[in-house]
């Protein structure tokens, strides 16, 4: 259940011709800190989704703006898990999300 003091905002981060799905858990009174949650892949991604959402809410309840992301080719981000260079694309996804947060904070 959504905490009334936390706003969950879905958005996309451009990554060349691809886009990454991300969520911002925005607290009512944010601090100047942020957390980026990078999920596991495969079955662990599906099995941890709810738990990571609760973790992000927990950080936000403490005033820390929290971001969750989905790697390129995973979840609702563009691309396929059969695309070449998976590991490098996932690392690039983390870098792109971290740089996005640095620019916005």
Image (cartoon, grey):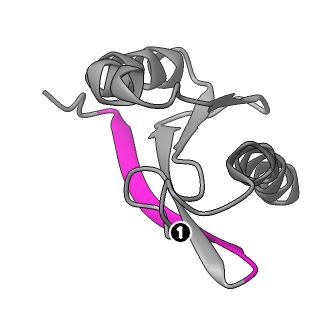
Q: Say whether residue 69 is magenta.
A: no
Classify residue 76 as left or right of residue 39. left
In the rendering, at what x and y percent does residue 77 appear? 48, 62
Q: Where is residue 3, by image quadrant?
A: top left
Q: What residue sits 49% from the left and 70% below the top? A: 78
Residue 18, placed above or below residue 35: below
Quadrant of image for the N terminus: top left
Please provide percent x and percent y for residue 63. Answer: 57, 23
Residue placed most toward the observer, 57 or 30: 57
Viewer-proximal residue among 85 and 33: 85
Residue matched to label 1 = 12
Taking the spot 37% from the left edge, 45% from the top edge, the residue there is 7
Dot 1 lies on which element? strand
Magenta segment main secondary structure: strand
Is 88 or 8 nearer to us in this picture?
88
Seen at 39% across and 20% down, the residue is 44
Instruction: Indicate whether 49 appears above or below 85.
Output: above
**Residue 105: horizontal and vertical position, in percent?**
80, 49
Q: In the rendered view, does 27 fall on the left or right side of 17?
A: left
Is 29 in front, or is 8? 8
- Magenta residue span: 5-16
95 to 14, vertically: above or below? above
């Amino acid at each position: 259940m959504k905490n009334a003091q936390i706003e969950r905002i879905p958005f996309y981060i451009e990554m060349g011709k691809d886009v990454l799905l991300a969520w911002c858990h925005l607290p009512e009174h944010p601090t100047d800190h942020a957390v980026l949650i990078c999920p596991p892949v495969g079955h662990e991604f599906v099995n941890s989704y709810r738990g990571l959402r609760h973790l992000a809410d927990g950080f936000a309840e403490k005033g820390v703006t929290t971001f969750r992301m989905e790697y390129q080719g995973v979840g609702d981000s563009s691309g396929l898990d059969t695309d070449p260079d998976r590991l490098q694309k996932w690392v690039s996804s983390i870098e792109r999300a971290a740089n996005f947060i640095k620019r916005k904070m």
